[in-house]
Amino acid sequence: MNRKKLEKILKLVEKPARYIGMEKNSIVKDFEKTKVKFAFCFPDNYELAMSYLGLHILYFLINQNEDYLCERAFLPNYDMEKMMREENLELFSLENKEELKNFDAVGFTLQYEMSFANILRMLDLANLELKSSDRKESDPIIVAGGPCAVNPEPIAEIIDVFQIGEGEEMMLRFLELLKIKKEKNQSKDEFLETLAKEDGFYVPKFYKPHYNEDGTIKNYEKLNPNCKDRVKRNYISSVDKMFQIDRMIVPYIDVVHKRAVVEIFRGCTKGCRFCQAGMLYRPIREKSEENIKNIAKTMIDNTGYDDVSLFSLSTCDYTNLREVAGEMKEYFVKNNVSVSLPSLRLDSPSIDVLKDLSDVRKSSLTFAPEAGSQRLRDVINKNVTEENLVDVMTYVFGEGWSKIKLYFMIGLPTETEEDIRGIKELAYLVRDLFFKRDREDIKGDFRLVVSTSCFVPKPFTPFQWFKQDSIDEFYEKIGILRSIIKDKKVEYNYHDPELSYIEAVLARGDRKLSDALIYAYKEEKKAEKLDNEFIYENYLSAFKKYNLDPDFYARRERSFDEVLPWDIIDVGVSKEFLKREYEKSVKAETTKDCRISCNACGIKNCEMRGKHENFV
């Protein structure tokens, strides 16, 4: 790494603190003396990456072992990338400013399908070949994990090995085997074969998909007899016994979420039928109250933050949240530390916890009704009612909150225009609840933000078989909402339908997409489009180049009998359960919370299952 060149360009770019490292709690080890060197890559900019809890967990987990080293690398912003290319500087880590090609392994987290292009950009900046088959024996192992890894096929020609499931135990096993590889001077293929024998590791080169004449998958052929028939997702049985972080790296600059984050449980029992995370992170596992309180207090001491977020997929469902919140309240107020709760459910537990935290500094509150009518909420199994909405909003307005965000989806299965118009009706109901109170009771300047995203069918959900709306249909629905939401106090924004369409293609795509993704990136690079801006036409031209119909992936109903690209992966939730939920959705029938009765989803060793005698 030419440090003189780096120092030169850092004086010329916006926010050089994105690239210098040296933040509070960051760790710099001796690069040459460490036995196994791992680069954690987040395929987006610094501000977003540093807000991701998983980065901090793996960073401190790996670095606690004296034999291992974990350093960070992120996607440079446009100005930095342009200058790096002009000065022939390769992508480097923040800690030791080492080029990525000097690491033993380079790992990418897959949080969002649209980040696949950024992975290619980062590999290119690191001067590494984009296809795994083109990389040299001496090049780092390219590994990827995260929620999008459950359908690894669209980038199967790019990534060497995928970690399927929760990363803490798998990452340590990966590094342990990598250390053995180096000690025994094993080849890359020998190392990959060792991984493929274990649960949770998917090595694409050992599997060959065969296709039917209509383009659907016929089957997967194992090219190595030692690899698994299906790769089982790994999950941690006890979140109390796993590695716990008591600090985070503290950035010098503002990032998306600049606060301490404490994970209070994993999994979700609600069973929303569109939600991939709710299916993937089963079973539910709660941290103990004492553990949560100790981590929160230590995290504040070690970071200096004045805001702590109690994080999970559905925070208010934590069994003893009121007790935890009540005991922490005095500490929060005394130290002027506020509490942040992620998206809240519209139900009584949310009111209860807000009551317990009512003295904490007020901020905006976020709720996700998801659909504008009760019928459609039943279709998606979002078990909240308009009465719940009225109860929650009446309480929060009375307690002084005045800024509310409501999230909805458009394009959900069975949706009608009446459902779309119901979004406006719910928004105006919230507005009216605020202003219809007595004048002396109105506190704060009311602001309501209504956001709609476009439904994207995701693998391992009951909705994985449904088609997506067309781009024109999405714009028609957006147009309806724009024409009827006219109040100055109610802001409406929406997600880009073109972006959601490509997301759906990649979410349900197969291995044939890898070459198209690489082609799209190379065309973008030729045109010197280095600003990381989404260019819809680039994807369309790439699909055309490889004779791929994007509608085949995004807009086609799948049959229950079809072999899906992600059937090679076993996440624990059974296809029979997903089929039952699909069929119930068409009838607008709901399914009870797992905390009430077991729904026989297929997950084994679930603590919820042992608490119920009633089984579906």
Image (cartoon, grey):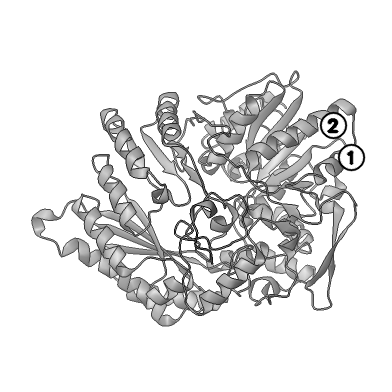
- Which of the 4 image quadrants contains residue 565? bottom right
- Residue 89 seen by the camera: no
- On-image quarter of the C terminus: bottom right
Q: Are marks 2 and 1 in contact (CB under 8 Å)?
A: yes
Please give left or right for residue 107 compared with residue 424 in the image.
Answer: right
Marker disc for residue 190: 1
Q: Position of residue 566 (x, y in %)?
A: 72, 61
| Residue for point 75% across, 70% down | 563
Q: Which residue is mark 2?
A: 181
| Residue for point 61% across, 35% down | 58
Q: Position of residue 95 (x, y in %)?
A: 63, 26
Marker disc for residue 446: none
Q: Position of residue 161 (x, y in %)?
A: 77, 46
Residue kind at label 1, given as amino acid type: Glu
- For residue 611, above or below residue 541: above
- Residue 555 seen by the camera: yes
Give the secondary structure at mark 1. Answer: helix
Give the secondary structure at mark 2. Answer: helix
| Residue for point 49% across, 28% down | 246
- For residue 594, above or below residue 160: below
Residue kind at label 2, given as amino acid type: Lys
Q: Nearer the viewer, residue 465 or 288?
A: 288
Sooner in the amino-acid sequence: mark 2 or mark 1: 2
Q: Residues within 10 Å of mark 2 (few under 14, many from 20)?
A: some
